[in-house]
Amino acid sequence: MDASKYYDKFSCFTRSMLSRHIIRSSSSCCCMRVVSNINTNTNNINNRPLTTTTLQHQQQGRQSQLAMENNTMDPVKTYTTRQVIERENKFGAHNYKPIPVVICKAEGVYMWDVEGKKYYDFLSAYSAVNQGHCHPKILEALNDQASLLTLTSRAFHNDVLGEYEEFVTRLLGYDKLLPMNTGVEGGETACKLARKWGYEVKNIPNNQAKIVFVENNFWGRTLSAVSSSSDPTAYSGFGPFMPGFTLIPYDDLQALEEAAMDPTVAAFMMEPIQGEAGVVVPSEGYLKGVRDVCTRHNVLWIADEVQTGLARTGRRLAVDHEEVKPDILILGKALSGGVYPVSAVLANDDVMLCIKPGEHGSTYGGNPLACKVGMAALKVMEEENLAENAEKMGKLLRSELSKLPQDVVTTVRGKGLLNAIVINEKFDAWEVCLRLKENGLLAKPTHGDIIRFAPPLCINEEQVQECVEIIRDTVMTY
């Protein structure tokens, strides 16, 4: 391809990204961003404007429209929902069962499908877009760095990694950070690190180190992750499994005490709140108890905060609710604000420095694009007080959901904006989610009768009330 044509296309893309209709809400905690050229007259939330558009933004939008009409920009191809799903089913692996909606655009707490219908996002890509979809500061960091340097591998140093590592370790109070890409890579890294520590520091006999997990855990789909699973859907047909993994009940300190007495146990890995299991919140004091047991028995505590971390539960980290600190911390998902795969494992020197050069790594881990995006995402989290907003809006949401008829919704639970409702077993949670979709709210069942509600953390009170109204109207049809 001719280089000039490539750069013309790249410049066009960059200009279109930077000239998006981005406006900040007057609310201190809610980002409400305008999406142009979208039909918003399709359901009960579509007639409410996101914000007032300025003359400058109108002119930018008109310039983009004229460029489209003059064929100076590639036109956006439009397909029906059915056509897109049929194509995906024809050419893609069948390892997911999505809600039958095709999203083509998103901003803040909203998403639009290919027919132009607007929805509230009540999943946040499994808590990856805590900061809200397409946050302008995160996009700016992505675009700026993409025009300079995207990847060197770890064969060479890059000028952003050290800055990123210092920023994150100082923010979260650890000595070292090991950069990876996905949450499950972070979990794999933490397991390797714990085993190495077990052999080098705890003097566990070679090849005998154990890691204790809890029942109904979920941290990914790799062989190691399913080897630690108690869910037959996750592990059936994929053996033989990784040795050295044992399971105990969740929220059971006595079971942990007994397991930790084994001198070959190197670590205990758990989610502070179980997400995929249905937003299972442990008893108050459980996390403090975990810290105490692990300390007394010289066992590393690994906290999987890929889904619960970074303001989702109303604190910077879910472990902060009980003011405890794990030995190894795993982050992912919202570490990038949903625009790029970024994960990280944090630990202090006595643990992290057990791994030497050549013993672990990732071609993309720590790349400058990921580092810039990660710093921007964390700065948004802090500057916009997303943890505080999640705490406040979560209490409001649970309070309103608790008023739903108990013959349909039997349980409401959660912390911050990681919440779930349990549907009466005589009803179908999947069908409830399909009805929610028709009414303008997107959510997805987890484990049969449970529906997880986890909107972007920039949601405001008015939007929460609108969502509650949609949920209430949907439930009342039963």
Image (cartoon, grey):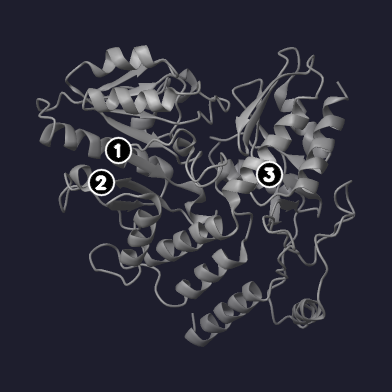
Label 3: which secondary element: helix
Camera-near label (3 vs 1) is 1
> Which three-letter amino acid code belongs to the residue tagged 3?
Ile
Label 1: which secondary element: loop
Q: Name above or below for residue 435 compared with residue 144.
A: above
Are there few (<14), some (14-19), or many (20+) residues within 10 Å of tag 1?
many
Are there few (<14), some (14-19), or many (20+) residues within 10 Å of tag 3?
some
Decide which of tag 2 and tag 3 comes sooner along the chain: 3
Residue 1 position within the rendered picture, expressed as x and y whole percent measured from the top left:
49, 79
> As rendered, which of 227 and 176 lies closer to the eye?
176
Residue 297 position within the rendered picture, expressed as x and y whole percent measured from the top left:
22, 22
Q: Name above or below for residue 459 compared with residue 166.
A: above
Residue 379 position within the rendered picture, expressed as x and y whole percent measured from the top left:
51, 61
- Gap in Å between the C-alphas at discs 2 and 3? 46 Å
Decide which of tag 2 and tag 1 comes sooner along the chain: 1
Residue named by callout 3: 85
Residue 272 position within the rendered picture, expressed as x and y whole percent measured from the top left:
46, 31
> As rendered, which of 426 and 222 lies closer to the eye?
426
Residue named by callout 1: 327
Q: Quadrant of the C terminus?
A: top right
Are there few (<14), some (14-19), or many (20+) residues within 10 Å of tag 2?
some
Q: Residue at x 42, y 47 (%)?
A: 182
Q: Name above or below for residue 27 compared with residue 75.
A: above
> Which three-letter amino acid code belongs to the residue tagged 2?
Asn
- Asked whether disc 2 touches disc 1, contact meaning CB atoms under 8 Å apart, the reply is yes
Indicate which disc residue 348 carries: 2
Q: Residue at x 32, y 47 (%)?
A: 346
> Which three-letter amino acid code belongs to the residue tagged 1?
Asp
- Asked whether disc 2 touches disc 3, contact meaning CB atoms under 8 Å apart, the reply is no
Q: Name above or below for residue 139 compared with residue 227.
A: below
Decide which of tag 3 and tag 1 comes sooner along the chain: 3
Label 2: which secondary element: loop
